Each structure stands twice: as structure tokens, then as C-alpha cells.
Amino acid sequence: MRRLSVVLAVLALLLIGGGVLAQDAPTVAVITPYLAQPGTQFVVEGFQTAAEGTGWTVNVIDTAGDVAAVISRIEDVVNQGVDAIVINVDPAQVAAGLEVASAAGIPVFGMDAGSDPLLVTNVTSNGYAMAAETATYVADRIGGAGRVVMFVFDPFPPVQKRGIIADTIFANNPDIEVIDRITPDVADGGIADSRAKMEAVLAANPEPGSISAVWAAWDQPALGALQAIEAAGRQNEGIVIVGIDANPQALDAIAAGGNFEASVAQDFAGIGAATADAVARVLAGETINQRVIYVPTVLVTGANVAEFLGD
């Protein structure tokens, strides 16, 4: 009987110890309304991959385009007692949720989001630099003169800043006219609505040469514009298309040698990994003073696209 009691006591201690260990394993919530976007999918996957082997429990929460719902989801995970929160959304639009997390002492990190005092840091690509490269590519490619269609998305800071830089570069070329500045519906990823809006622009500008280029703040609208141009039979007018992200469809389009000529390859896996590293450092007790952590990018054109195909 005594031996049985000892065995049961040891088992109880092991169970209690196992419970403590389980409780000590951090839980991290990743919250975004943009999981339909390939870029967001890649950064989330990069984060998950980097978190493998850490013992973390990573919960990915997609609000399917509903930015306001992010606030409620932040409040939910705070109540659940998560150890850290990662957001992929404009922090200014979810400030109420960030305040709740701050009051609970839970660190919040931006992953390709925007900067905010309530975030530990924001890990992203340099949107100013990417937009400067692609807008300059367009300006140079059309000889500093022509009519340009822009696709932008101001509600999301990483994309909004790209539009501002492109605006400035085009405005600095007096012979470039921006004939439309379009914000597409991104609920379905952005391609379908961008195609529909580009079809309307083409119909309003039917003369060959009336559109010189399409500058898109990310690849989905660029792909939609390409579809519209090809469907209208206007692919031989020399309309130059550029995007940002270098997603697989964009790389294939660039490699095909048609109107889609350039994009910028963001290191999405690197953004996810760098965010996971920042989370790990803070959970280990380190203070991060760098408010924004930039991950390098590369301009992709027909000259180097082969290096990126199949990645």
C-alpha cells in the first residue's frame, strides 16, 4: 500500500509539473483582416515556420476583411491570457484593442503593419524605397512623359506610403499625367475588382497611346490591369505595368515578357522570421528600441526574374 501511495504521489508531481510546463509555453496570437492577400499569407507562414520548435502555440486569426473586428479579436485573446500579439493591420484603426493589450501588459508587434507607440516594433519592408524604385522605373521607361493609371490602397499604412512616394515622383515629371488613382476592393484579393476598374479606364481612353503605364502599389491590381488590357486586345500598345511584392503570378507575368515588366521582391519569409525573432527577444526579457525593423527587398525585372522563379 505504501509503495502504491509513493507511485501515485510521483505521478501527481509529474502531472503537476507537466501542467506548469504547459502553462509556461508562450501563446502568440497573429491577427489580420488580410489573409486573402498572398503577401499576408507568406508573412504569416514565415512567422509560423520560424516559430516551429520554440514550443509556442501560434493562433492565426483572420477577420476576412473586417478591420473593426480586429479590435474584438485583440480583446478576446487578451482575455485568454496570451503572451504576445502580432498584428497585420493599420494600428491606428485598432487603437482601442491596442490600449486593452497595453493595460494588460501584453506586448503587441506589427508584422508589415504601421508604426505606433503602442507597438513594440513594426517589422516590414521599406515601402518608400520600393515605391521609389517602381515609380522611377515607370518614369524612366516612358521617357518622363505619358499618362499613368495608379492603383493605391490608403487604408493600410505599408501600402499608403507607397502611393505617396509614387505621387511625388510622377508629380516631379511635368510631362507625366496621372489620369486615375484607383482604390480597388480587396475583399476577394484585389484582382477581379482591379480588372473591372481597369476595363472602365480602357473604355474611357480608347485611343492607342492614351495610356502609357499602370503603377500598382502591390501585385494584385497590376495583375487585374494586365488581364483587362489583354482582354481588350491592347497588349501591343506598349502599356507598361509594374507592381510590388513579386508574388508567383507576377513573376510568371514578368517572365512572359509582356506588359507586366517589374515588381519588387519582398522577403516575406524574412519579415515573418524577423517578427518571430522580435517576439522571442521580448519574451526573453529584452527591450527593443528599434521602432521599425526593415527587411531588404530586390527590384525584379526580365533581367533577373529567373532567379526568383520556383522560390
Image (cartoon, rainbow, N blue to C red):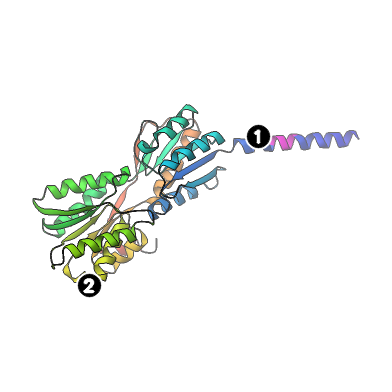
Label 1 Cα crowd, 10 Å radius (few <14 / some 14-19 / many 20+): few
Q: Please say if 275 is above or below 241.
A: above
Q: Which residue corresponds to the image point at 24% horizontal and 49% vertical from the top-left?
A: 131
- Please name the amino acid that badge 2 sits on: Gly
Q: Which residue corresponds to the image point at 65% horizontal and 34% vertical from the top-left?
A: 20
Q: Is residue 300 visible from the viewing direction of this image?
A: no
Is residue 15 inside the magenta stretch?
Answer: yes
Viewer-nearest residue: 247 or 99: 99
- Please name the amino acid that badge 1 sits on: Val
Is residue 96 inside the magenta stretch?
Answer: no
What label sits on residue 233 in the rendered view? 2
Q: Secondary structure at mark 1?
A: helix
Rounded to the nearest angstrom, the CA distance separating label 1 from label 2 is: 66 Å
In the image, taking residue 150 as reference, residue 45 lies left or right, namely right
Q: Is residue 37 visible from the viewing direction of this image?
A: yes
Q: Which residue is mark 1?
A: 20
The magenta segment: 13-17
1 vs 2, front mark:
2
Upstream in sequence: badge 1 or badge 2: 1
Residue 69 position, x and y percent, is 45, 42
Q: Quadrant of residue 176?
A: bottom left
**Mark 1 and mark 2 residues within 8 Å of each other at the beta carbon:** no
Residue 253 position, x and y percent, is 30, 66
Viewer-nearest residue: 73 or 143: 73
Q: Which residue corresponds to the image point at 22% horizontal and 54% vertical from the top-left?
A: 150
